[in-house]
Image: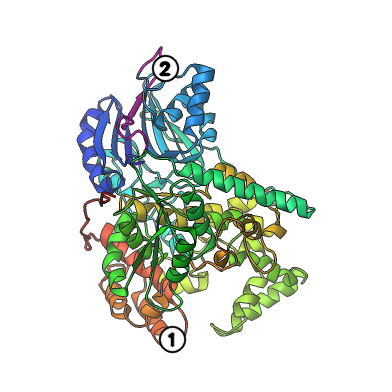
Amino acid sequence: MCGLLGLICATETGAANARDAVGAAMRCQRHRGPDEQDTWADAEVVYGFNRLAFIDVEHAHQPLVWGPPEAPGRYTMNFNGEIYNYRELREELAEKYGAKFETEGDGEAIVAGFHYLGAEWVKRLRGMFAFMIWDSQEKKVFGARDPFGIKPLFYSAGPGGVAFSSEKKSLLELSDVLGVAQELDRTALQHYLVLQYVPEPESLHTAIRRVESGTSFEVVPGGEVKFTRYFHPQFSAKPVNSQAEAEELHQRIADVMRDSVGKHMISDPDVTVGAFLSGGIDSTATATLAKEHNPNLIAFTTGFEREGYSEVDVAAESAAAIGVKHVVRTVSADEMMEVLPLIVWYLDDPVADPALVPLWFIAREARKHVKAVLSGEGADELFGGYTIYNEPISLAPFEKIPGGMRKLIGKVSTKIPEGTRGKDLLRRGALPLEDRYYGNARNFRDDQLRNVLRTYQEGVGFKDVTAPWYDVSRGWDPVARMQHVDLYTWLRGDILVKADKVTMANSLELRVPFLDAEVFKVAASIPLDQKLAHGTTKYALRQALAKIIPAHVLNRRKLGFPVPIRLWLRNEMYDWARGIINDSKTEELLDKKAILALLEEHKAGQLDRSRQLWALIVFMLWHGIFVEHRIKPEIPEPVYPVKL
């Protein structure tokens, strides 16, 4: 696990001149790898890396240099992530091709497999990763990002070359070397305010993009980057026609989850892996299965001292039931206000998910005890866990209404006062799935956004992001189509960004056993009536885990890490929010009077504007840090664990 930075120079003399700049640019991602830091250069390529060591701590250094017997040292790899099936891959490569390995680490399985089997090898990797392999013989870089987008990878290209990095901040530092101007991307800003995150491959800087999840790439010095999508997820449901078939499906789910959690527990003996624990089924399952491999497992929970916004009591009951040590960190409004600018700095691009703040605090607490944690991200997308997935069922009667009448219903809904019960049901019922569902986050609608965004562009909307994925899923059942959209929107844009950025900010590695290639194969086969049944979501998963997790969790609705911003923005956070809005130098982009009116409307209790306000506040802080350079968070040194 590390923070990587790779620069492929446009000229043969470029690397020698750029090495110091790359080393300096790595400083702003030192939190990603405090165990080892250095730079490496060839004639056309410079690597920077910060390593957080888990496997073969003493020998598997970065960058990793490898080659076959006939060409030793041919390849040099910069690698961020973990490959959970690396032992099997190494054995296969040694047996079939005579591959030789110098370390016990997982990185050599990537580069050796690439040498013998080429770009297709990336499909065999089971894990989370972003890597670059420099082939000194072919004078070419090959790289890839994992299927789900667990590990980040940004890139920027200009006259000086092309650079890839785990952190966008490092690419901003290299703007002069690359010869690019970093301007604000107004289309990405509009997408952000609608979605609550910046969708891939965009970033809020025009000259920086993201390598998309499930994508590989090639580039030669002085050439353009060529991308290839290698991961094409298919939700291919298989009918369950009997109780015996249902039980067989549930057993396959239990077996693959047990296997995945076991794989995700890999580390050297002196590296401890813990688990995040909320009151829900996903994190409880990972913690329960993890304890089978680590009897001394430590579980970590965060919450708030406000009724309805904490799962601490349920998590404590779960921890006691499965027999693990339990560490709790509660968070106050004052702490949230104080730390938010720092978190926005770590994020690189704004993410308007308030849950990332308590996650930052519990990650910081966890890093005092362990170096890695398991968590339950991905379970809802793969197994059908979001309540919104019930919507096609609840709106089914609208499908029987003729198209003209449905449009009329939609027009009628616009005349109903905002906040009136049933208004949104009518509005959404009048729309086909592709027009109403754009991921689990729904923030500003177009008519609302026009009031606050001065740079609003007609024709820019969520369909820019979702249309390609809906095209792929034609003919699937509506819930499978929603899950598919979520894989490419909410999951990789919000959930995994906050999971990676906020934990790595504390030099803590987060592992997500649900987002595993083998788990996906099983989950993708689950039919609709095994996802939503008997008044619950994730039905098949619940049945599969019935004999594994404590009974009090099995059918409980998950809260996750809920944050009471709705209440706090009316009280404790009101003056703070008003101050951020007034101080922000975003008048060219945003109508601050309209935003202040939203705040007053929210404070008066007329309507809940908390999520819209939070998105605007987070962007204003981001703008203050990365555009105005007015806000300068004090960046702490990386956190190290105590001796256990």
Residue to which mark 1 is pinned: 605
Query: Which residue is depicted at the point 56% across and 85% down?
Result: 417
**Image coords of residue 47 (percent x, y):** 30, 33
Identified by mark 2, the residue type is Pro
**Image coords of residue 341 (percent x, y):** 28, 63
Residue situated in front as seen by the camera: 298 or 590: 298
Mark 2 Cα within 10 Å, few/some/many (few <14, many 20+)? some
Residue situated in front as seen by the camera: 97 or 162: 97
The answer to whether residue 472 of the structure is visible from this angle is no
Queried whether the magenta region covers residue 280, the answer comes back as no
Residue to which mark 2 is pinned: 68
Mark 1 Cα within 10 Å, few/some/many (few <14, many 20+)? few
Which of the two discs, 1 and 2, sits closer to the camera? 2
Query: Which residue is depicted at the point 50% across and 43% down?
Result: 262
- Magenta stretch, overall SS: loop
Image check: 96 left or right of 151? right
Q: Which residues are magenta?
A: 55-72
Identified by mark 1, the residue type is Gly
Task: Count the marks.
Answer: 2
Element under disc 1: loop
**Image coords of residue 354 (percent x, y):** 40, 67
Element under disc 2: loop
- N-term mark: 1 or 2: 2
Q: Quadrant of the N terminus?
A: top left
Image check: 176 left or right of 325? left
Query: Which residue is depicted at the point 52% across and 70% down?
Result: 445
Q: Quick check: marks 1 and 2 in contact, CB under 8 Å?
A: no
The answer to whether residue 544 of the structure is visible from this angle is yes
Residue situated in front as seen by the camera: 110 or 283: 283
Residue most extreme to the right: 241
